Every structure is written in structure tokens, then in C-alpha cells.
Image (spheres, rainbow, N blue to C red):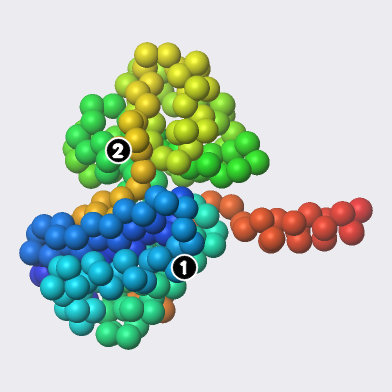
């Protein structure tokens, strides 16, 4: 991959959560952004959206320098849809891929925030996928590691002397509990800044060419095993007792 490429053309795909989308970065500008939050099946909507994005940007797959996928954490099925789409497109034209961390991409919604950005994704079973990022310098700088935790455990791990903003699809589920626990220290992101948008994935991929990998090497980012695997492990454990 080119190490001296200053303004790569990036196609980013996100199907990792309830909101799906794609974006194109070209000549240092976001020239196309699609956001879909209408509840339709990602596997049916994402490729027509990608086709429209490339056409709108006046760009073909062969002109794309890197195909970025939001690789998780998130919905196991959704993550696989986006990763497979990016891998297929990149493989077809012999270009690299970039795995974009969903929690980092969410933190980009509060670029420059003087505090910690705390993405929370609904992980079901009473847990959230979570992390915390210092955004004062612009790009996400990790303040707490990735985890899958009960919300109260995550809140207990946050520093007591920082302003905090909460983003992600866990916000509608847990905003009341967050505000009750943290009071005025917690800012709850409004709907227009709450969800992951694929243009953030474009910027993260462009800024980190050292992380680009061959298409075959693109992998999902999981913070815990898929439910089917966990169920199988529980059955195996019960069978040995």
C-alpha cells in the first residue's frame, strides 16, 4: 500500500448497528454520505447504497484506494455483512481494506470535546459495549479499554473529575440510568450526534494507512463470542458436570 498517499479515496461501509450507511472521501472531502435508519434489512440495502455513493461521487471501485468497514463491536450479523461487502469489493479490484472500530468512530461525533466521549452500544442481556476516549486533540485517544459490561460497572470505572458525553445506540436504552448516576456531569448526545456515521470511518481510515490490510485479512472486531458460540459452550460445560 502507498505510504506517501496524502489524500486517499476511501469508501466506508457501516452495517454494524441499527443505523447503516456508507460514505466516500475524495480529494480530502466527504463527497457522499448515506445514513439509513429505517429498519430495513442491511443485507438488502447496503449494496444499492454503495452503488449510489460511488455514482454520486463520480468514482468507480477501481479508483478507491482503501475500502473501510466498521468491523465491530456491534450486531454479529450486521458486522459480518459490512466486513464481507468491503472484502468483496476490495478483492475484486485488488485494493486494501481498513477495519474501523465502531466505538472510535462514534467518538468522532465529539471531535475536540473537552472531556471524555463514552460510546455505549446495546449488547443485550443487560450489558453495553463500551469504552472512553479523550477527544481534546481531535483523533480518539483511548482513556478506558474496550469492554462488554453491565452499565453500572462501566459508569463506576469512569473518572470522577471529567465531563462526559454519551453516544451510541445504547443511549436511548440507558440515558435515564446514566443521568441518574452521574447528574450534570453527563451530557447525553442528541439524536443528530448519537449514531455512527460512515464519514467518520472514512476519516479514520485515511488517517491511518499503516493499518490497511489485504482484503483477505479483514476481520470482525468482537468483544465477546457470538451468542450461538456462548450457548454451545454452556451446553458443553453442563455436559461435563
Query: Which of 226 and 191 lies nearest the eye of the viewer?
Result: 191
Q: Where is 196 relative to 128, above or below?
A: below
Q: Residue at x 82, y 60 (%)?
A: 236
Q: Quadrant of residue 91?
A: bottom left
* Residue 17 located left or right of residue 76: left
How packed mark 1 is, by other alpha carbons closer than 10 Å (few <14, some 14-19, many 20 or more), is some
Q: Residue at x 15, y 57 (%)?
A: 30
Could you say which disc has been placed on residue 43 in the image?
Answer: 1
> Quick one: label 2 or label 1, which is nearer the N terminus?
1
* Residue 169 located left or right of residue 8: right
List the single residue furthest toward the top.
Answer: 184
- Residue 169: % across, % down: 45, 41
- Residue 192: % across, % down: 30, 38
Query: Which of 24 and 117 lies nearest the eye of the viewer?
Result: 24
* Residue 174 in sight here: yes
Q: Residue at x 38, y 36 (%)?
A: 167
- Residue 75: % across, % down: 52, 55
Residue at image mark 2: 192
Task: For the residues labelled 2 and 1, say whether their Cβ atoms are less than 8 Å apart.
Answer: no
Secondary structure of residue under mark 1 = helix
How packed mark 2 is, by other alpha carbons closer than 10 Å (few <14, some 14-19, many 20 or more), is few
Q: Residue at x 63, y 36 (%)?
A: 126
Could you say which disc has been placed on residue 118 in the image?
Answer: none
Amino acid at each position: 500500500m502507498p505510504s506517501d498517499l496524502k489524500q486517499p479515496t476511501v469508501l466506508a461501509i457501516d452495517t454494524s448497528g441499527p443505523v447503516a450507511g456508507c460514505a466516500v472521501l475524495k480529494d480530502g472531502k466527504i463527497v457522499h454520505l448515506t445514513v439509513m435508519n429505517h429498519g430495513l434489512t442491511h443485507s438488502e440495502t447496503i449494496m444499492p447504497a454503495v452503488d449510489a455513493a460511488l455514482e454520486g461521487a463520480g468514482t468507480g471501485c477501481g479508483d478507491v484506494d482503501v475500502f473501510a468497514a466498521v468491523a465491530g463491536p456491534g450486531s454479529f450479523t450486521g458486522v459480518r455483512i459490512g466486513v464481507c461487502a468491503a472484502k468483496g469489493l476490495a478483492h475484486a479490484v485488488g485494493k486494501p481494506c481498513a477495519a474501523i472500530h465502531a466505538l472510535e468512530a462514534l467518538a468522532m461525533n465529539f471531535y475536540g470535546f473537552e472531556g471524555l466521549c463514552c460510546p455505549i452500544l446495546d449488547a443485550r442481556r443487560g450489558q453495553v459495549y463500551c469504552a472512553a476516549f479523550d477527544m481534546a486533540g481531535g483523533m480518539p485517544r483511548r482513556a478506558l479499554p474496550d469492554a462488554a459490561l453491565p452499565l453500572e460497572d462501566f459508569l463506576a470505572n469512569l473518572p470522577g473529575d471529567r465531563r462526559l458525553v454519551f453516544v451510541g445506540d445504547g443511549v436511548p436504552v440507558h440515558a435515564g440510568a446514566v443521568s441518574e448516576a452521574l447528574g450534570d456531569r453527563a451530557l447525553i448526545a442528541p439524536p443528530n450526534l448519537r449514531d455512527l456515521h460512515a464519514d467518520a470511518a472514512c476519516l479514520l481510515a485515511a488517517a491511518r494507512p499503516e493499518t490497511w490490510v489485504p482484503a483477505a485479512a479483514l476481520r470482525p472486531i468482537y468483544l465477546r463470542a457470538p451468542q450461538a458460540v456462548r450457548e454451545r459452550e454452556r451446553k458443553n460445560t453442563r455436559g461435563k458436570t
